């Protein structure tokens, strides 16, 4: 799966020691599957550092091997468990990381949510009222990589290759959706976890230079579409 990190500079090498503590899922390196969210983060970070901001793109390789080497946690939507987890991680009185997960995925407590989150954390609004408000909030997404082991699942993709992959992916995902009659999320899961995608995202090969129709035929054979 293509994931994006928005910041004030390009990330060629991830240093977990430079990551901020007391964030949603604890200290770690954060990415999102939504490019427009990363663009917003890059803009804000750039403004704080007097730069234009920058997006770094990675291929997140989620596989049985990842399940073997990493302990993962997934939150589907703004749930009570998600809120409790966020509250624990944002507690500045905690001197150590409050969990032992390698990879955590779920919604973001962005600026709009954070304003109301402070009301909940300080007892000015109830948990039920806060969660009801989030029912109408836009869908968000983030993945936090907390350990050295988890970083093995991220593969840096340079800018030129990113442009090619995004153009190819747009066409292929449209065809998967139509041919298999499935939604965009499932189509993305199928494509981005495939060997075909792994091949085109590796610049050591020339697969990304192929026409998207030819790449789609390869994918069809792999997935029996």
Image (cartoon, rainbow, N blue to C red):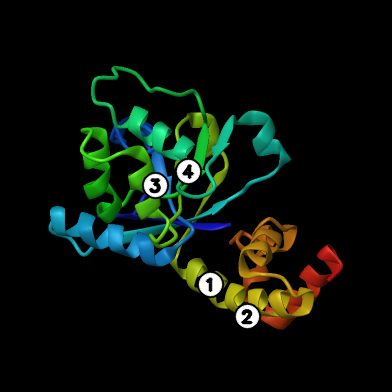
Q: Quadrant of the N terminus?
A: bottom right
Residues packed near mark 1 inside 10 Å, few (<14), some (14 to 19) or many (20 plus): few
Q: Position of residue 169 (x, y in %)?
A: 60, 72
Nearer to me, 210 or 67? 67
Nearer to me, 74 or 67? 74
Nearer-N-terminus badge (1/3): 3
Residue under the image location 42 percent in, 56 percent down: 135
Give me the C-alpha separation between circle 4 and circle 2: 34 Å
Nearer to me, 43 or 108? 108
Residue beneath disc 1? 166
Given this view, does label 4 or label 1 mark the residue nearer the observer? 4
Q: Please say whether residue 108 is visible from this viewpoint.
A: yes
Q: Please say whether residue 13 is visible from this viewpoint.
A: no
Residue under the image location 66 percent in, 58 percent down: 198
Nearer-N-terminus badge (4/2): 4
Residue beneath disc 4? 79
Nearer to me, 92 or 166? 92
Total numbered circles: 4
Q: Are marks 4 and 1 in contact (CB under 8 Å)?
A: no
């Amino acid at each position: 799966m293509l994931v994006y990190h928005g910041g004030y500079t390009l990330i060629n090498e991830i240093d977990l020691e430079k990551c901020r503590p007391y964030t949603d899922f604890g200290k770690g390196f954060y990415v999102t599957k939504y490019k427009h969210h990363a663009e917003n983060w890059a803009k804000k970070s750039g403004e704080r550092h007097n730069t234009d901001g920058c997006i770094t793109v990675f291929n997140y390789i989620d596989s049985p091997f990842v399940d073997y080497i990493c302990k993962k946690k997934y939150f589907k939507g703004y749930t009570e468990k998600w809120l409790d987890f966020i509250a624990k991680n944002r507690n500045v009185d905690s001197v150590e990381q409050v969990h032992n997960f390698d990879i955590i995925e779920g919604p973001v407590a962005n600026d709009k949510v954070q304003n109301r989150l402070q009301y909940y954390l300080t007892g000015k609004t109830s948990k039920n009222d806060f969660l009801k408000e989030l029912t109408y909030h836009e869908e968000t997404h983030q993945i936090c990589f907390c350990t050295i082991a988890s970083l093995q699942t991220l593969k840096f993709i340079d800018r030129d290759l990113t442009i090619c992959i995004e153009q190819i992916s747009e066409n292929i995902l449209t065809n998967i959706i139509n041919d298999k009659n499935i939604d965009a999320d499932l189509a993305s899961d199928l494509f981005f976890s495939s060997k075909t995608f792994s091949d085109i995202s590796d610049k050591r090969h020339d697969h990304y230079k192929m026409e998207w129709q030819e790449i789609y035929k390869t994918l069809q054979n792999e997935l029996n579409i």
